[in-house]
Each structure stands twice: as C-alpha cells, then as structure tokens.
Amino acid sequence: MTHNAGLAYLSSALLARGHDVRVLDMNNYGYADGEVAAYARAYQPDWVGASVKTALVSSAERTIREISRACPQARTIVGGPHIGVRAREYMKSQDVYEFGLTGEGEHALPDLVEGKSLSEIPCLLYYEDGEWKQNKTEFIFNLDDLPYPTYKTWDRIDRSGFPYLMVHSRGCPFYCTFCSVPKINGRKFRRRSPEGTIDELRHARREYVFRDFEFLDDNLTLDIDHAKEVCEALIQADLGVGWYANNGIRADRLDSELCVLMKRSGCKGVAIGVESADDDVLEAIKKGETVDQLWNGIRLLKEADIVVGGHFIVGLPGDTLEKVKKSIAFKDSVGLDFAYFNQLVPYPGTELGEWAMENTNILVDDVTDASHFGAKEQVFMETPEFPKEDREAVFKLLSTDYTDGRIEYSDFKDLYADRSGLNVLLIRSGRMDPYEHVKSLLPEGSTLDVLVSTGVRVDDSAVDKIIEYPTPGLMSLKGLGRLRKPLRATYDLVLYLNTFQNGMSFDNIVKIARHSGTKVYEYQSGGHMREVKSEGYKTTELYSKTKGSATARVSGEKKQSAPATPDTSSDQAMVVSGTKS
Ligand code: B12
Ligand code: SF4
C-alpha cells in the first residue's frame, strides 16, 4: 500500500496555517456508493480538492461532482501530476473544478483558501474575463522548511503499520522522453539536508509504527556525494529502520562506495529504471545511459548485497520482439532479483506521448487507461516493426519466463485429481480474472473463493464466494497477520494471481505461504503454476533458478463466511479542506 505523499504534505501545510483538513484516500480504502457524499455532507467542507494522475481524471471528476452535489457551497480545486502536464488544456475541457494548480501546493493551497489575490498565487489556474489564466510555475526550494507530511488527517488510515514515505529531493535534470517528472517537478534538482531527513524520520518514528521507509525521490542518487552524506547520516543516527528506493534510481548515478554505504544504512532494495537493454532504444528515448552503464550499476548494487529490481518498458520507439528478448536475457544475466515489464503508456504532455500519437497504430479507445499497466494481456498499440502478434508473444515470453518451482497446468490437475474436492482460495492481484479456467483445474466438488482488495468487483459464476479483505490493502504486512488463521482453518490450497510479476507483493505471498502452512501456488497465464515455497523469503531466492518441488499437502475443513462487500465508485485520492479553526 502506497499512500499519496502529496496529500500528506498538503495536509500538514494546511494544518500549520490553522485549517482543518480531512483526506479520503480512495486508492487504498474502499468507499461505497454514496459514502463520500455522506462524509462531505456531514463535514461540510468549504473547499474540496482532488489529486489527479492522467489515468484517473474521469474517476476523480465523478467523485468531485458527487461531493459538489452534496455540498454546493464548497469550492473546488484540482492538482497533481495531470495538471502539471496538461494545465490549461485540461482546465478548458472540464466543468467540475473552479481552480487548478500546476505544481507544488504547500504554499499555494493555503494562500488560495485564505483568499490571497488570485494573480499572486504561483502555479494557479483560474477563470477570469472569459478565459483560463495560468500563473507562472514556481518550485519550492527550501524543502527542509516544509512541515513534515502528516497522516493524522486521513480517514480510515491505520497508522500502526505502513512503510513511511520519504521525499528527500524533488526534480530531475534528465530528458527521458516517456517521463512526466521533469514537467511536474522541474529539471532543477532540489534536495533536503541529511539532518532534515533524519529529523523527519525521528519525528515519524514517534508518530507511526514502521519498520521500513520508502524514498519517493525522482532521482535519489543524482548527486552521488550528497547521497553518501545521507547514508552516513542514517548510519550515524542508527534509527533501526530499513529503506527501499523502488521508484527507481539511475544505474549511472552509483559508485561502489555509495552502494556499500546504502547497504550499511539499511537499504533493503532498490529498483533501476532499465527501460530496455538495447542501446538504440535507450538513445531514442534520450535516457542518457548505455546498456554497459546499466550493467555496471546493477552489478555494483549486487556486489553490495542489495536486492535489485528493474523497471522495463515494452514498445518504446524502435523496439521489436528481438529487442525485448534481449531485455529478458539482460535481466537474467545481470542477475536482477525481480523485473517489472510494462507496456508503454504514451502520456500526453510527454515527448513520447506525441511520438506515439503520430507513429503508432493505437488499438484501444483510451490509451492512458491505468489498466494498461502491468501484464494485462491486451495490446493497445503497434508499429510496423513491432506488430500486435509480436507484442502478444511478449506476454507469453514473460509469463513462462520463470522456471523455479514450475508446474504445468496439466500436471497440477493430475496432482489433485484423486481428491474429492478442495477448498481453494484465490488471491487476486493484478487484472486477470481466469476463474473458469482455474476451476477446470480443480477436482470435482471443489469450491473456489476469491479474495479481493476492497473495491474490486468480481462477477463470475465459477466463483463460489467473494471475500473482500476486511482491512483495505490486501498486501499490507499487518493485514497478512490476520489472514494466517482463517487460511489455516479454511483452505486446502491458496492460488495467487501474480499478473504483474510484482516482486513486492510476491514477497508478501511468500509470507502467507510461510505462516499459514497452506500450500500456495502462483497462477501464471502462460500454461503453468509455480509453487511458492515457504522457506523462500526474498524474491532473490524465489526467482533463482533452483528447482522447487511441486508436491502438495492437503488438509482442513471449510468454515468461513464472507464479510460484507462494500462498493467503490472511484479510486482517486482527494483532499478536503474545511473551515479555518
Ligand atoms: C509514489 C508514486 C506512486 C505510488 C503512489 C501513488 C499515489 N497514490 O499517490 C503508486 C506506486 C501507487 C503509484 C501508482 C501510479 N502512478 Co505513480 N508515482 C509515484 C511518484 C514516484 C511519487 C509521487 C509522490 O508522492 N510525490 C511527492 C509528492 C510530495 O508530490 P505530488 O504527489 O506531486 O504532490 C504535490 C503536487 O502535485 C501538488 N498536488 C498533488 N495533489 C494535489 C491536489 C490539490 C488539490 C492541489 C492543490 C495540489 C496537489 O501538491 C503536492 C505537494 O507539493 C510519482 C513521480 C512524481 N515525481 O510525481 C509517480 C507518478 C505520479 N505516477 C505515475 C503513474 C503513471 C502512476 C499510475 C497511473 C501507474 C499505473 N497505471 O499503475 C498509478 C496510478 C495510481 C493511482 N491510483 O493514483 C506518473 C503520472 C504521470 C501522469 N501524467 O499522470 C508519475 C509522474 C511517474 C512518471 N515517471 O511519469 N505511483
Ligand atoms: S525517468 Fe528518471 S531519470 Fe529519466 S527524466 Fe524521469 S525521473 Fe529523470
């Protein structure tokens, strides 16, 4: 579960100026139809704001309309990445929000709600004299002076267990053509002091319970010397917390001393933005890195014993099936612990977005739909050199890529054929719903229940029961603890749909296997399952090439009934700013 750190920053900025704030995080917590409006009616906000990424523009609009109907007096504002990249163009196209904000809101939002003159608020978009006006973008440079982000204002949050989010720096000077970051946060790298960072962590340790924190920086190690100072400060402070940088760091912004310091300061895992293991593709996207540099950076991290993942994009300019095969081979030969292969989403406002509109054949209605991420097996664009069939072949390649503990569907079916019926729980993670096929692999008389995160709808006759995970955020560590007992008592088998080949959530599934004592298989779409071994803890071990066994232990009797399933109309976070106290 990753919260929206921007809303935590906006909350603390508003609180510091004496306002009351509530945050409804619709990404992570399910809200039933009408619930948001009811909340707003009870709270009676003066201002309502939405934080919007391109993929979620329409769901945010629906939510804000609903609130506006419930509280017609509330004034409305929209901010977040989409406004950073589309600004006036978006504001002109909509009739939901009165104001927009293109950049950071910590100063601008309190200024606006306090009635400062509109023309004097940097980054503000407002309608005046028959047109949308846009004030100059100004970035915040004194990041150390910002109030620390707060989650106290969040509805439904459980502050006793989530990875703390740390924004140590903002901005990136690179020119990668697919990336929205330079437009959103600017090309100037703005960083905090190591002392300020340690102080925030100390504060956070008093407020929240967490074992690890996550750096959300755009380019954490851009300034290698500064990054070393941050690591040294962490070592010195000895806070007893680990950290991750899974958003992605650059392989060419590392040296061996930094990697060793990262490890000593508690680094548990990082991801590298690889994108492609083909130099021509890297050049075409202005990545400013070569395959050799990527290789070297990853090796340095591995030598320092840091778990390393890689982010890859399939379908970049010049990409072909052969080049993707090179990327897959690269991942294996360099020893990446896990890899995320995503199809290119050409976001408007990026150079690549424009390239895609002109040079590719788009096969879907909405190319920025969030569901295109991950391994949803739908090709949504093609080029002459990388046609639809070849892109489909990539899905196949990726799904059959891992061999550890692998068991073909037919062997799996044989393994359980003599059982008189199994109670099976299927954990849905990702966007694949192959319930009928799963059921066909189980012996006669089996039941198939599906565990989903709050807000996900599953409507399939092959499913016996939908169990909505009572604590939102299926993959949260705290939640897993609660899952163990019912699992042990109720199910013979657990299947996990890992359509994203997602290392982080996979780690959590390993914990389920470990603690429940129930046999767990990962269901992959390419013709096989994979046994999740409870002794494996790190993805490093699980995705290694050692052979796993595929024998099953079957036990237990079904006893459980499902909790009620709330419904959700949107998955966009929002911030509600109320009356000045
Ligand atoms: C952490 C992160 C995530 C997390 C958490 C997302 C979340 N709920 O916020 C996870 C991993 C879940 C995630 C998912 C996705 N992400 Co993401 N993510 C990021 C990342 C790395 C950091 C965001 C962050 O916390 N920044 C720090 C805070 C302080 O800044 P901020 O969020 O921008 O907020 C400030 C301002 O924007 C503004 N602001 C924000 N909201 C509002 C609202 C109002 C009313 C106002 C006035 C101001 C305001 O004020 C805030 C304080 O200064 C960014 C990269 C980036 N630099 O933005 C990508 C990024 C935002 N993600 C991106 C994408 C594409 C996605 C996904 C759509 C991918 C997908 N299809 O699955 C999903 C969408 C999920 C969702 N439902 O929101 C793109 C967005 C591009 C775009 N044009 O929309 C980015 C920019 C990455 C990139 N390289 O292009 N993401
Ligand atoms: S992908 Fe990374 S390095 Fe490239 S512009 Fe975006 S944040 Fe910077």
Image (spheres, rainbow, N blue to C red):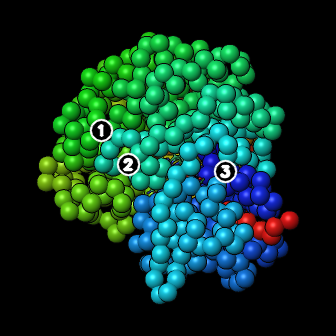
Residue occupied by mark 3: 9
Quadrant of the rendered image containing residue 121: bottom right
Q: Residues within 10 Å of mark 2 (few under 14, many from 20)?
A: some
Identify the residue at image location x=82%, y=34%.
206
Quadrant occupied by the N terminus: top right
- Name the residue furthest bottom: 130
Residue occupied by mark 1: 287
Identify the residue at image location x=41%, y=53%.
183
Q: Is residue 338 above or below residue 151?
A: above
> Can residue 141 be seen?
yes
For marks 1 and 3, give the CA distance.
30 Å
Q: Is mark 1 within 8 Å of ligand 2?
A: yes
Number of labelled discs? 3
Amino acid type, callout 2: Cys
Amino acid type, callout 1: Lys
Of helix, strand and loop, which one carries label 1?
Answer: loop
Q: Residues within 10 Å of mark 1 (few under 14, many from 20)?
A: many
Amino acid type, callout 3: Tyr
Q: Residues within 10 Å of mark 3 (few under 14, many from 20)?
A: many
Q: Is residue 304 above or below residue 172?
A: above
Choose between 413 and 519: the one closer to the eye.
Answer: 519
Identify the residue at image location x=28%, y=53%.
352
- Mark sitting earlier along the chain (2/1): 2
Residue occupied by mark 2: 179
- Mark sitting earlier along the chain (1/3): 3
Q: Is mark 2 within 8 Å of ligand 2?
A: yes
Quadrant of the rendered image containing residue 284: top left
Quadrant of the rendered image containing residue 24: bottom right
Q: Is residue 183 left or right of residue 295?
A: right
Residue 332 screen position, x and y as percent: 34, 23
> Can residue 458 be seen?
no
Q: Is mark 3 within 8 Å of ligand 1?
A: yes
